[in-house]
């Protein structure tokens, strides 16, 4: 360990050495770096006893070189290059000046030149200034002997290195450095950018450094990929078609996979389409034999349907003719439609007004009325319907019109609108009773209406009666003489001098366990007495129609008749739960159709044997049906042959729309 006294002694002896030796050492050293710290330590040691402030001994004794602090690399590179240029210039200048002065002026001049060269080169020339703990200032290198203020003896700022002689600097390049002054022990600041003003004691050098810094070219911003490559020390690879394709695959593949996942989830949670029934059996069935010939009258027109199956026969030209009280069929239909009445129910009460009582007296003039009702009497809906359908009371028909629509005119408008809805093309109503000759229709149109009326048991329970007793106790006979014979259930007669005899009839028959209804109309019978003529003609036709009805097996129990379509390509067979027998007559072709029957949607899953719908035989599927062919006379339940399963994931995933 070197003590403070030894340092002082070494400095004193170094000061008395031959300056020529110093110069020679400086010259022979050539480009060797001079240790400025050793020179400075010697100089400071010589004069420390007189005026230098006390220095912390432990700090001075144990002071050792410290590793260079981490500095921003681009800035360091710039400063390092400047320092190297400055140090090299100083060393070269010192060597050159020392050799010249030694030859011409003697050892004294050589010593001075060597000292100046060492100062110009700086301690440990070539090392960065941050390694020496100094403030970095860029400027032009100063060679020894240039005559700069530092070399000619101008005062230097406190804390700057002081050379002690060329020989000392050249001989001891690895000697221990002397203690720092208090200013040197202060942390040094390395500016990354030029300071706003020159550093004290280094104005000239700072100015030149600022000029050099400002003179640096402006570097344009670089692309992020190049900066990233520079930070990772990996240059960007050259662009090739293969790398371009691979990069696009890397970018788009995750997005495509995400879209596939989203699509799969959406397909899995989408509501399933509603299952439907589809028929696989033949959609029609033909009865053997020729078409039957019904015994029609010689005049007028007629039409016969088997309700829900089709048209059995017709005769005469279907043209509008007066129909008399048959018009009351439409009056009853509107009342039942807008004021529903259950079978056996009385329904709401209707007050008899003065007009109805007054019109009841028209019976004296030959008009069909019920003259036993008085103003203030109360009739139930059932009683009012019986009054117009059995004794054919015109005054009660007009009373119902006022009760329902507020006026007869408004009610007649309803009658014509309803006729249009039912497809009655040859029908026009001008009054609710049919008394006026301008109320006209055809046999076909009246059968269309009768097919709807027989669906109301509350009405057929009235029309099949041979007579009716009014609230006063008076009994009125039914003008329809077909009841209660041969299964007849009504419906209504209508006779006037202009219209002749007219009758719309209905009769039922059990055929192979199925109840079938025959509906017919005979119009325009003028043979007297006209009421008997129309009853006789209608009875003959009705009985003949009932006789030709027969049954035939179309499908047997267990036969596959169709399937349930789940809407995604899945089919589950359905079978008939019992033998399917069609009712008809020779030459008839009936249609078959599958339907849910109840109006409820089919399930997505169900066990084998579950009833899922009906097989309808006849009705609108028939090719020879009129309006009376609507509906179905025969319905057979159909059930699943095997379990109905929900569509699989594959079907859900691939469905479109």
Image (cartoon, helix red, strand yellow):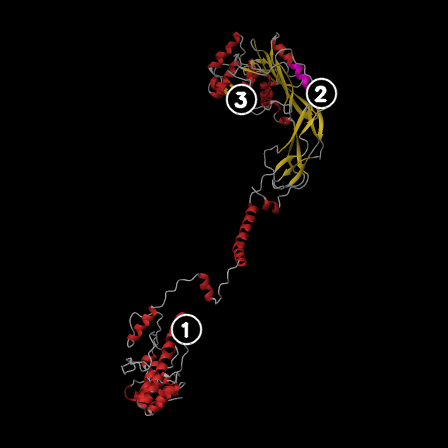
Locate residue 99, reporting x and y percent.
35, 87
- The numbered mark at residue 70 is 1
Q: Secondary structure at mark 1?
A: loop
Give the camera-side residue of 275 and 490. 275
Say if residue 655 shows up in the picture: yes
Residue lying at 31% horizontally and 82% vertically, measured from the top left: 145
The N terminus is located in which quarter?
Answer: bottom left
Camera-side mark, 2 or 1: 1
57 or 197, which lies in front? 197
Quarter of the rendering containing residue 301 = top right
> Looking at the magenta stretch, what is its main secondary structure?
helix
Instruction: Please indicate whether residue 645 sits to the left or right of residue 399 in the image.
Output: right
Rendering coords of residue 187 (x, y %)? 35, 76
Quadrant hosting residue 516: top right
Which circle marks residue 232 in the picture? none
Query: Depth check: 148 or 177 in front?
Result: 148
Residue at the front extreme, as displayed: 104
Q: Secondary structure at mark 3?
A: helix
Rounded to the nearest whole Å, what is the CA distance between mark 2 and mark 1? 116 Å
State which region is magenta: 538-547
**Residue 539: in magenta span:** yes
The residue carrying mark 3 is 420
């Amino acid at each position: 360990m070197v003590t403070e006294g030894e340092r002082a002694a070494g400095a004193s002896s170094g000061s008395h050495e031959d300056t020529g030796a110093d110069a020679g050492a400086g010259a022979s050293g050539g480009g060797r770096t001079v240790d400025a710290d050793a020179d400075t330590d010697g100089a400071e040691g010589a004069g420390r006893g007189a005026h230098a402030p006390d220095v912390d001994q432990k700090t001075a004794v144990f002071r050792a070189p410290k590793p260079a602090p981490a500095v921003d690399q681009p800035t360091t590179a710039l400063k390092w290059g400047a320092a190297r240029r400055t140090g090299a210039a100083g060393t070269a200048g010192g060597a050159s000046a020392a050799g010249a002065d030694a030859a011409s002026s003697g050892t004294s001049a050589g010593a001075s030149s060597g000292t100046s060269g060492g100062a110009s080169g700086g301690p440990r020339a070539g090392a960065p200034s941050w390694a020496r703990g100094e403030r970095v200032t860029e400027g032009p290198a100063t060679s020894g002997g240039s005559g700069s203020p530092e070399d000619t003896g101008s005062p230097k700022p406190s804390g700057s290195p002081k050379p002690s002689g060329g020989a000392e600097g050249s001989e001891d390049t690895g000697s221990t450095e002397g203690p720092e002054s208090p200013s040197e022990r202060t942390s040094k600041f390395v500016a990354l950018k030029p300071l706003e003003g020159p550093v004290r004691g280094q104005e000239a050098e700072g100015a030149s450094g600022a000029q050099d810094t400002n003179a640096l070219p402006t570097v344009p911003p670089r692309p992020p990929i190049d900066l990233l490559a520079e930070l990772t020390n990996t240059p960007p690879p050259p662009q090739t078609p293969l790398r371009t394709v691979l990069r696009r695959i890397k970018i788009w593949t995750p997005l495509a996979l995400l879209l596939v996942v989203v699509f799969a989830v959406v397909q899995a949670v989408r509501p399933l389409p509603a299952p439907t029934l589809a028929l696989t059996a033949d959609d029609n069935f033909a009865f053997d034999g020729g078409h039957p010939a019904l015994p029609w009258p010689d005049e007028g027109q007629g039409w016969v349907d088997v309700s829900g199956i089709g048209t059995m026969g017709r005769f005469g030209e279907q043209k509008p003719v007066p129909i008399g009280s048959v018009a009351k069929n439409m009056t009853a239909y509107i009342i039942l439609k807008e004021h529903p009445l259950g079978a056996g129910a009385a329904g709401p009460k209707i007050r008899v007004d003065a007009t109805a009582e007054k019109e009841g007296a028209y019976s004296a003039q030959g008009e069909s009325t019920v003259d036993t009702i008085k103003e203030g009497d109360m009739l139930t809906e059932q009683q009012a319907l019986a009054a117009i359908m059995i004794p054919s009371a015109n005054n009660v028909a007009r009373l119902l019109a006022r009760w329902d629509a507020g006026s007869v005119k408004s009610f007649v408008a309803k009658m014509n609108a309803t006729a249009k809805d039912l497809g009655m093309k040859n029908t026009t109503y001008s009054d609710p009773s049919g008394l006026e000759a301008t109320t006209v229709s055809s046999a076909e149109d009246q059968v269309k209406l009768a097919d709807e009326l027989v669906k109301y048991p509350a009405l057929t329970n009235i029309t099949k009666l041979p007579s009716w007793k009014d609230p006063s106790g008076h009994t009125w006979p039914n003008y329809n003489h077909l009841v209660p014979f041969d299964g007849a259930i009504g419906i209504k007669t209508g006779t006037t001098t202009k219209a002749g005899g007219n009758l719309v009839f209905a009769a039922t028959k059990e055929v192979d366990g199925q109840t079938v209804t025959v509906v017919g109309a005979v119009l325009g019978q003028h043979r007297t007495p006209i009421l008997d003529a129309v009853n006789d003609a209608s009875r003959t036709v009705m009985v003949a129609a009932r006789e030709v009805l027969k049954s035939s097996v179309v499908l047997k129990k267990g036969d596959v008749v169709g399937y349930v379509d789940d809407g995604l390509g899945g089919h589950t067979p359905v079978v008939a739960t019992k033998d399917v027998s069609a009712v008809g007559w020779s030459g008839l072709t009936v249609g078959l159709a599958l339907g849910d029957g109840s109006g409820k949607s089919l399930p997505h899953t169900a066990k084998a044997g579950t009833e899922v719908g009906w097989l309808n035989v006849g009705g609108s599927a028939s090719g020879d049906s009129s309006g009376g062919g609507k509906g179905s006379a025969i319905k057979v339940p159909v059930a699943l042959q095997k379990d109905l399963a929900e569509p699989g994931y594959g079907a859900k995933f691939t469905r479109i729309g």
